[in-house]
Image: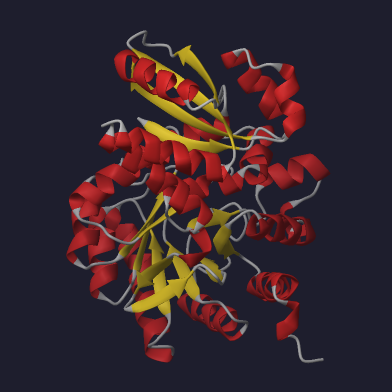
Amino acid sequence: MNIQIINISFPEVFQRYSRKYNIFREFYEFGLSALELRNISNENAGDIHKIILEKKEICYKAKNGSGEFSDLLVLGNLSSFKQLAKEILARGKEDLGYKISSVLRNYSDYDQLSISIGGKDYKLTDNYIIGILNVTPDSFSDGGKYLNPEQALNHAYQMINEGADFIDIGGESSRPGSDPVSAEVELQRVIPIIEGIKKQFPKINLSVDTTKHEVASEALRKGVSIINDISGGNFDPKILEVTKKYNAAFVIMHLPGTPKDMQQNPHYDDVVTEVYDNLQDKINRAKKTGIKNILVDPGIGFGKRVKDNFELIKRLDEFKCLGMPVLIGISRKSFLGKTLNLNVDERESATLISETLSIKKGARFIRTHNCKNAVQAKQLFKYFNNPDEINV
């Protein structure tokens, strides 16, 4: 069972849910939010539906594809949802009541959360910049530019001096259509860079972009604090145990298929809920392994149509319900180029606008090529929210 707050104030989102649940059109004019409970047993769904209606709240029920389970959609606001959670608890449905309360708390108290990375707490009242360093010959944006270790290290130093909070080092391209490389090749590419950065900036937290437990293990041994796995542990489950062993943070991303085939006719009925459920399943598995510090990434550009990427950004705040910091990687992505007819080296302004909108929608970790621009977005967002902190 998954629980999610849905922003049905967007006309197209309301229409989609109206078709599923046969919602009265008049409710759109009320500006209500929605709480969806997915994959509940038919018996439980019937009981919960009855409880909600008895409280004079608006609730719809729909069978999902399996036939053995149902989905519920409750219309209201955060306050009414919290009262319903208490009522469900009082009626003996403790697991469900606690889970609803937890999701609502994740959403409403998102900016009060924090994550521990490398022995430091990062509070979600602030935003953090992750500089991208691809030491590969074939990455979509900067492939081949930083294969030379000296050039790679100089670029890392530049990003740190521009204000990057983290550097994410990748030794294998994950661009659409790319082929995997061996763990040995990845290690040859990333380990000297990790060692060089740590020598020059021993306090900087580093991330390694890998799906292989061998690479993760050696990188962590060399002082990396984050494992950024585009498969979320799907390609190599041993990477979860390695991450736990070193008490590292783990980035879970949504990726359908593999980079080789992910862009072959991707399709979603509702990209946000499908990505949300996939991330929730991966979070549950990582937690069972014992990983405590998790970030979630909806996987912009990974197995998504152009319109899917825009909808994910538009509804990014719904991922707050997962209770994990949201990481976003938009920098120079092809959906920006396709929309605005821009070559990869012409996408800086589009990137900055998209990153700023993502921050507004709840992204707190921004993975980017242009750290200078992203730092400015971070600073401006801080002052837009807290103008009294400006002394000029």
**Which residue occupies 40% across, 16% down?**
70
Quadrant for residue 309, please give it: top right
Where does the image place residue 90, in percent across and percent down from the top left? 31, 36
Residue 273 x %, y %: 51, 32
Figure quadrant of residue 378: bottom right
In the picture shown, does residue 210 fall above or below 77? below
Say which of 280 and 189 sits in front.
280
**x then y, percent, for residue 363:** 57, 58
Residue sitting at x 56%, y 31%: 271
Horizontal side of residue 319 vs 380, given as left or right? left
The colour scheme applied to this rendered structure is: secondary structure
Is 335 on the left-hand or right-hand side of 283? right
| Above or below 6: residue 134 | below
Q: Is residue 142 left or right of residue 281?
A: right
Q: Is residue 87 left or right of residue 61?
A: left
**Towards the viewer: 307 or 73:** 73
- Residue 61: x and y, percent? 48, 16
Q: Give whichever of 128, 71 is nearer the camera.
A: 71
| Placement of the N terminus among the 4 image quadrants | top left
Which residue is at 33% across, 66% downward?
188
Depth check: give the residue in front, 32 or 335. 32
